[in-house]
Image (tube, helix red, strand yellow):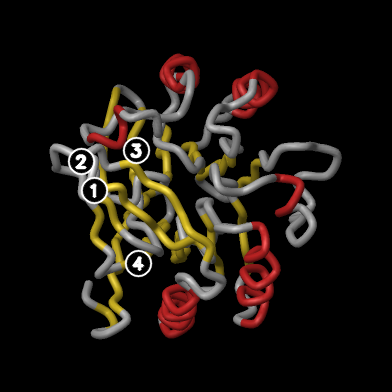
Amino acid sequence: MKQNKSKTIAYVTDIHLGQHLQMDNELGDGKMSYNSNPDEHKENFILILDDIKRRGIKEIIFGGDIGTKDANPWFFDKIKEYHFKLFMVLGNHDTFSTAIQYYNNGFTDGRNEMRYSFEGDHFKCIVLDSSLNIVSNAQLIWLQQQLNTLKKVLLFIHHPILEINTPLDRIGAALKERDELKKILIDSKFDIIIFCGHYHMTDKATEKNIKQITSVAASYQILKESTKIETDQSTFGYMLIQIDDDSIQSNTILLSSFEGNVD
């Protein structure tokens, strides 16, 4: 991805195609599960792609969680229909073996994880694979090598690395051994911006040299400030990442199947 002096990229994550959310509210513990529905969230995805195209954006970073294995062909074919350039991040509902059948950007040749990096004029972009709910030791070693740069680092990973004060962070959804990954980032002393999803909520957090931006989900939202797991299925959306020389800005775009753009 060659970065011009000014450009905008769409960051879309957590579409969960084919997965209909079920909440076990009777027990009051907020347990989540999915039933299969081949058409689930397809309309959301089309509305999002239409909105991105309307804004004249050419590049998409997908932050993970396509959905069911059977939804993968439709997902990748739909993006091709819009002629977007795609950069892929894998989530915990994705597998490398499935995604690599439809997506290979040339960076992942000879690997069994969706990890890669690329550089622009002012930033180095690093993609990590947390599809197994953990970042492997091989990736941690590779990351330390990749952080040997004088450029600002944009790190794309499905799971948040910095803690978010929400019930979801405390029920087993958090990235395993994330403190080890965080230590590597802090010890690098480079300015690092993390873009992530997974929690289906917007959040911004900072710790030392790290700034973390968590994106709205393309399927449904989870309420951040709540005593238990509660969802909001009335809105969905994506995020715009605006690059201007060596500065970064992000903007959340909310959509509704009934009302259109509500940002």
Q: Judge depth for marks 2 and 3 and give the one in front.
A: 2
Name the quadrant of the N terminus. Answer: bottom right
Residue 54 drawn above or below residue 57: below
Question: Helix, strand or loop at disc 1?
Answer: loop
Relative image position of residue 228 (x, y in whole percent): 19, 39
Q: Which residue is drawn at 22% across and 49% down?
A: 230
Residue tagged 1: 25
* Residue 13 appearing in the image: no
Amino acid marked by disc 3: Gln
Residue 182 drawn above or below residue 63: above
Amino acid marked by disc 1: Asn
Among numbered discs 4 and 2, the one appearing first in the sequence: 2
Question: Helix, strand or loop at disc 2?
Answer: loop
The one nearer the camera, 36 or 165, is 36
Question: Helix, strand or loop at disc 3?
Answer: strand
* Residue 69 appearing in the image: yes
Relative image position of residue 250 (x, y in whole percent): 32, 56
Residue tagged 4: 237
Residue 83 drawn above or below residue 218: below
Among numbered discs 2 and 3, the one appearing first in the sequence: 2
Distance Cα–Cα, label 4 vs label 2: 27 Å
- Which quadrant of the figure has residue 175? top left
Residue 49: image tag: none
Distance Cα–Cα, label 1 vs label 2: 5 Å
Q: Residue at x 40, y 63 (%)?
A: 218
Residue 52 drawn above or below residue 190: below
- Residue sitting at the far front: 26
Amino acid marked by disc 4: Gly
Question: Helix, strand or loop at disc 4?
Answer: strand
